[in-house]
Amino acid sequence: MQYDLIAIGDVTTDCFIKLKTAEELTLHGVAELCMPFGTKLEYESATEVQATGNSANAALCVAKLGISAALVSSVGDDGNGKKVMESLQSRGVGIEYVTVHQNMKTNYYYILQHGAERTILLKHEPYPKAIPPFSEQPHWLYFSSAGDVEFQNSVGRYCSSNGIKLAFQPNTDQIDFGYEALKDVYAATTIFICNKEESQQILKTQDGDMKKLLDGIRALGPKIAVITDGRNGASIQTDAGSWSVPMYPDPAPPVSRTGAGDVSASTTVAYIAKGMEPQDALLRGMINSAAGVQAIHAQLGTLTPEQIEEWYAKRPADFQATQI
């Protein structure tokens, strides 16, 4: 079948370990999670969430919003791999492009949760990467967290050669690679999403002016740039102009912010794919993210389109896109 969107990226299982004995300290300007060393510590709970990772989160989110979606990824032939496949399929994400690798393990993360924030212990299995032969070309590819530089650039070239729109939400490794190493990806990108600090790293600048950062990202190739800025909301730029939007107020104290960025990014992409004006799509992304953080993982708290519009109808007066 022809999917509206196919996401490409690593998939994992997250194990959330809610800590009881920990504190956050700031040393040399860096927030650190601190616990007693060389002893036994009780923890409050441990909860597994299946089928996580930037691209898997995106596929699950857009599927709930009525966008037909599939995932290109890899799992091992173990119990966690089976659970990941079942979780994706039960929530409406196509799994025909998820490869099961014999005698390999499925990616598994340990997430040390302290309040609404967390530190993630990760390990990626060395799966081979390749773009599969799609039965029909999708309208969009959503790309994050996958493979070496050559594979990543091949995704960009594939989109350019086949007229496919590309949403690029780089993970930490992709940010560290830098623009020069991933030129083919940037050149093919329709919409690019990152946070403010990541945009400064990409552009090699300390300038915090959001308009300049948006200009800089779009100068690298993306047609639309989205930059998030924590509690300050997010900004978006297209050929038509630049807008900033605030955060949607939390209906209750957040349970966990894990996956919130993936939800806001993929929701924005979904509504742009539906034909909504980008700045209005970003407002929906902020709403879905606010809902997501009420769950232990944001992908478990996302809304349907009808629920998003209900939240939008109840928005505060200042929850609107402002041109910058």
Image (cartoon, helix red, strand yellow):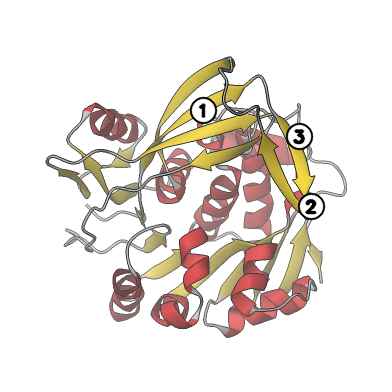
Classed neighbour count for the residue bearing mark 1: other residues with Cα under 10 Å, few (<14), some (14–19), many (≥20):
many
Residue 156, given in percent of the width and then of the height, sits at 36, 74
User: Residue at point 64% right, 34% down?
Assistant: 293
Disc 3 marks which residue?
A: 250
Label 2 or label 1, whichever comes before in sequence order: 1
Disc 1 marks which residue?
A: 16
User: Residue at point 33% right, 41% down?
Assistant: 107
Q: Amino acid at mark 2?
A: Pro
User: Residue at point 32% right, 62% down?
Assistant: 147
Residue 113, given in percent of the width and then of the height, sits at 60, 30
Residue 197, given in percent of the width and then of the height, sits at 68, 64
Q: Amino acid at mark 3?
A: Asp
Front of the two marks 1 and 3: 1
Please, what secondary structure does the residue beneath circle 1 have?
strand
Which image quadrant is residue 21 in? top right
Disc 2 marks which residue?
A: 246
Residue 57, given in percent of the width and then of the height, sits at 45, 43
Inter-mark Cα distance, 3 to 2: 12 Å
Please, what secondary structure does the residue beneath circle 2 have?
loop
